[in-house]
Amino acid sequence: MGLGPFSSFMTGTWLEATVVAVVAGVVGFFVVVRGAAFAAHAIPQGAFTGAAGAALAGVSTLAGVGTFSLLAVAAMARWGRRARHDVVTALILVGLLGLGSLFLSMSSQYSEQTFSLLFGEPLAVSTAQVIPSASIGVACLVLVATIYRRLLLASVAPELVAARGVSPERVESWFLLSLGAATTLALPVVGALLVFSLMIGPASAARSLARQPLSAVALSVGLALLTVWASIVAAFYSNWPLGFFVGTLGVFWYLLGRGVQLRAARSLATAPGGAGGPASGRSLGPGPRRGSG
Amino acid sequence: MNATALSVPVVGLAGASVLHSIFAPGFFTTGPVTAALVIGAVVALVSAPAGVLTVMRSQSFAGHAFSEVTATGGSAAYLAGVAPLLGYVVGSLVGAGAMGGLGVQRARNRDLVAGIVLGATLGLTALLLYLTTVSHSTTGAAVTVLFGSLFSVSSGDWLAAVALGGAALGVVTVTWRPLLLSSVSPELAAARGVRLRLLESAYLASVALSVALAAMTVGAILSTALLIGPAAAALRLAKSPGRACAWAAVIGLVAVWTGIVLAYDSYDWPPAHQGWPVSFFVVFLVLAIYVVAQLFGRAGSRRRPGTGQGGTALSGVGSLRRRGPGRG
């Protein structure tokens, strides 16, 4: 025996998943606060093209994914700030994926690998692979820690940041970069289609449950860890794709957060003298969007 | 004198060979190609008004979420062994219900609601496709459902596609004016006694149907290209939403048909001599047209920066929005 999910050949997977969850939890909090779920969804799908291209060219998946994440981030930072950025995001997404479909058609013998790149693969990680991912993860966390205050302020009140002499666009670019880094890490484990689910599911609950931004980040990381760990065990035993569990748990967290928020609102409304805005003080909503869109 | 007498057959020959090099032999007589041309036209027509409304309402993410919900339906159909179109349509309509129920129309949490529904359905897609590969021992289902192939549409499907397309167009035509009003200013529409909930259901249903049709042609993930791309380009070019619909239909038609021609021709292309995917061509033609439209449209709007007067249909809508009270 000894082939359980906790045996030694799974060490790499557990380490990798932990790195992924910590980074996704932190970045995901800002995705939710900034209302950037579409970007968080589009970057991994663009990066999937990188994985398909890497398979075609015979280079490492991490390199392909990283390159195309950066490409998607650069395109969004360049064109996303004017006109309607949801349209631009959608078109960047389909443009990169269209290229991905071409790559796939040229290397159709890899369809099993394709499937795991799209939907996640719990057993794909060796211990040696953890080192580059961990370095990307640390770099990403350092980046977020450096811009933490500005990012938070820019998410809630972009005008205030501008008044302090920092351009909100630059903050947005740094944020997208951290999103790209998180994507590069998470894609090979969770799958291109469900990276964003790991980011927004736990973070949406954390936003509703926590009172302080910092504790919300911590809670988001905690829930993301729980999601990934539980998903690995479930995927290990059922042999079902990892992404299924991540997506389902994401919905669960969201509904949990929403339910708690609703109850709080109701008790505020029924409590004597509690007529003030229901739960408005405790949740960080997406701030006013830039641009006319 | 000799030269003119010679040039006629030469030009004729050149013309024939040019035609020949554009339409590879057998293009017009191949069954799948004919079906693809018909369905492509239906998709372009139906996506135009739905796309224009989606862009005007800033609902691109929801539109994209539909496409992936559609993928869930498609993979369920694969697993059950029924027609993919049925799966696409049912999946898409269920997704419309879920997103409408969770409140995708409200600006505040729109992005999160679309994302959560998207995550749930993608997870389900993963499971269904996995079960398909296990039970049918075919591994290509994922690629077919997600990235599509217009040439694999069966001839029985296109009658159904025409009927569904007609239904979607009918819904949009009947509700066009109030929908437009509610896109620009929900408050104004409500003040005029428009029933917003009903209207929004109609809008979501029409998007759902057009995405389901588009999923058949370019695959579930890429159907966003046909929904958003032509409409965004058209809104840049046209002066009114009505004309934008016409433009979007033409752009969509050009992209799909040219894509079909190119894909048919690409059977001789390197590296594998098995053809490049139609979806790839369609998506890139749509993007190219969008970029061209941006370049042309910007020249017009730059003259009056910020005022939002005249210019394109989009800038007009933007200015109305800015003037009106914020929504939600």
Image: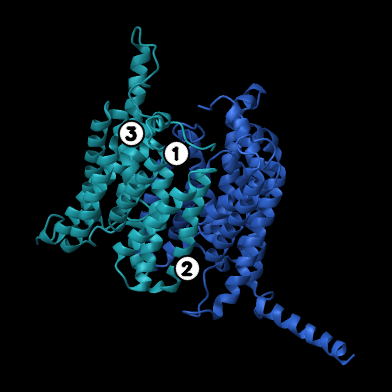
Chain colours: A cyan, B blue
Image location (x, y in percent) of residue B121: 41, 48
The alpha-carbon separation of the residues under discs 1 and 2 comes to 29 Å
Contact, CB < 8 Å: mark 3 with mark 1? no
Q: Amino acid at mark 1?
A: Asp
Q: Amino acid at mark 2?
A: Leu
Image location (x, y in percent) of residue A277: 40, 17
Image location (x, y in percent) of residue B256: 62, 62
Instruction: Please tell me which residue lies in front, B327 or A261.
Output: B327
Q: Quadrant of residue B140?
A: bottom left
What residue sits right under mark 3 in the picture?
A152
What residue sits right under mark 1 in the picture?
B111
The secondary structure type at the circle numbered 3 is helix
Residue at horizontal 65 percent and vertical 75 percent from the top: B30
Choose the circle earlier in sequence order: 3 or 2. Answer: 2
The alpha-carbon separation of the residues under discs 3 and 1 comes to 18 Å
What label sits on residue A102 in the rendered view?
Answer: 2
Residue B221 visible within the image: no
Contact, CB < 8 Å: mark 3 with mark 2? no
Contact, CB < 8 Å: mark 1 with mark 2? no
